[in-house]
Structures are given as C-alpha cells and as structure tokens.
Amino acid sequence: MSVTSRARRSAPPGEPRTIGWLYAAPALLVYGAFLLYPLIRAAQISLYDWDGLTVGTWAGLDNYRQVAQDDGLRSAFGHALVLMVFFAGVPLVLGLALAAVLNRAKVRGLAFFRTVVFLPQVIAMVVVAVAWRRIYAPDGSLNDLLSAVGLGDLGRAWLGDYALALPAVGLIGTWFETGLVTVLMLAGMGRVDRQLYEAARLDGAGPVREFFAITLPAVRGEISVALTLTVIAALKTFDLVYVTTKGGPGNETSVPSYEVYHQAFEVGAVGLACAIGVTLTVVIFAISFVITRLVERGDA
C-alpha cells in the first residue's frame, strides 16, 4: 500500500476538502438556483422602472424612495407590524400559559390535545381563509352567535369595517399560530428536570414563581424558534389577506406581500414590486437576527 493511500485512509471524514464540497454541491446548486439567483435578480430589477413587458429604464434607488415615501406602501409595512402582535405576541402568551397549565396539571390525553391544537397548522391557509371569511360574513356564524346571546347590535360585516378589518384578519393568525407555539412550549417544558420543581416547592415557591424562575428560562430556545417562525409568517402572509380582504376596505389590511402582487400583476410596476420584496426580505432578516441575538445574550 502506498504512502498516499495510507495517508488518505487515516484522514478524518470529509478530507480532502474537495470530497466534502462534492457532497454539498447538489444542495448548493439547488439553493443557488431557486433562492440566491431569484433574490439577486429581484434586487437587479428593483433598480429599473419596468412594466414587465417593454424594455426597462434605469431608475436607480427611485423605487426604494417610493417605498419609503408612499403613504400606502408605508401603511402596508405598518399593518405587517400590527399583524406581528396577533401572529407572534398573542400566540406566545397564550401558548406559554396553556403549556404551563397542561405541563403542571399532567392532563390525561395530552397527546390528543397536542394533535387538536396543532391541527390548524396542517390545513392550507387558503382553506382557513375561506372558512373564516364565512364566519366573519354579515350572515356568518359570528353574527349569529352574537344574536343568540343578545348582542346582535354588535354584529357587522367584520372584514368590511375600516377599524376592525385588520384585527379580524390578525385574530385568524392568532388562531392559526397558537397551536404551533403551544406544542413547541410543551416540548421544551417536558425536558425540564422535575426535581427543580420539587426543590422550588420545598422552598415555598408557588406556581407563578415556579413559572418565572424555572419554566420560562428553560424554554428560552423554544421561544426563539416560535418567535422567529411566527414573526416571519406575519411578515410574509399573502394568501390570508388575498382571500379574505384583498387589502381592503380601502388599503386597511394591505401588507407588503400583497403589495408585491398588486404592484407587479395589477399595476404593472414590476421594479417597484421587486423593491418592496427586497425591503421586506431585509426587514425579515433584521428581525430574525435581533431575536436570535437577544436569545443568545440571555443564554450567555
């Protein structure tokens, strides 16, 4: 056996480096073709004034200036921030509370409960949107329920109300995301050593103190995952808005993802649509980075 062959056999897995790159090459090719190239191409188009059919003209950063200065587009990003409260903030609070109660009480049939609360996650958002549009309709289930309990005067076309349309859409997100957050929190709480709770109870700690002293620090990683997933879901939601309101009434429920579709395929401003998409991508990266850094700083 030659010296070269013996050296190759004694090398650690993945050596020489070229073999490792060959293994990673298919995944890198797919990643580059379906993610990096479209992103770079969108960034390029965002610098042009282009309707998608004729030859585009160089616009520089004008499309980005329009994103920053147009009231309607700024409102769309503001609406996305409001939806973050409904998609991420409220589900996190509800999920933590539900998981803490279930984990402490040791409810029988916990696996069945997990399946039930996770069920919305396996339903296509379009189906969810169609179902909730019927619930919110003037002759829908919500108004029927209010009439049944003597609160019929509160009934209205919820998705057509300028003040309540955005919260109504947000509540759909709350219903959709709470199950995911609850299951994540239950998984994290299940890993906590029970002896820590027993020691805390011997020291006289009650349920609330146990939660803040033991449970909450133990599930910090799961909170980071839940916040990242739900915040991204809030920022990139399109199908829910398109099916329920199409950005209306007026533009009260318009969000950046819907504006990308509206500007590109209905207005014909493809360059502006790409600028909105690139801006949204930067916002998502920035928020995800902040969430990750905050959690890492808490672990340090």
Image: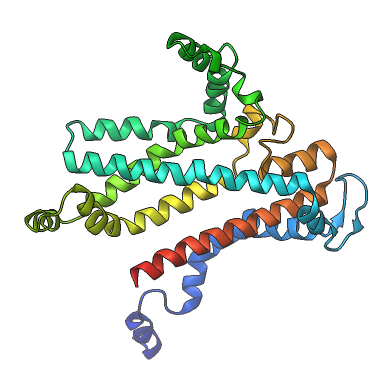
Q: Is residue 45 visible?
A: no
Where's residue 58, x and y in %? 90, 60
The residue under the point 40% across, 64% down is 295
Which of 189 and 70 lies nearest the eye of the viewer?
70
Q: Quadrant of residue 45?
A: bottom right
* Side (left or right) of 180 relative to 250: left
* Side (left or right) of 171 relative to 29: left
* Rendered position, 297 above or below 6: above
Q: Quadrant of residue 94?
A: top left
Q: Is residue 192 visible?
A: yes
The residue under the point 38% across, 45% down is 93
Quadrant holding the N terminus: bottom left
Q: Quadrant of residue 114?
A: top left
Residue at the bottom extreme?
A: 3
Quadrant holding the C terminus: bottom left
Where's residue 39, x and y in %? 68, 57
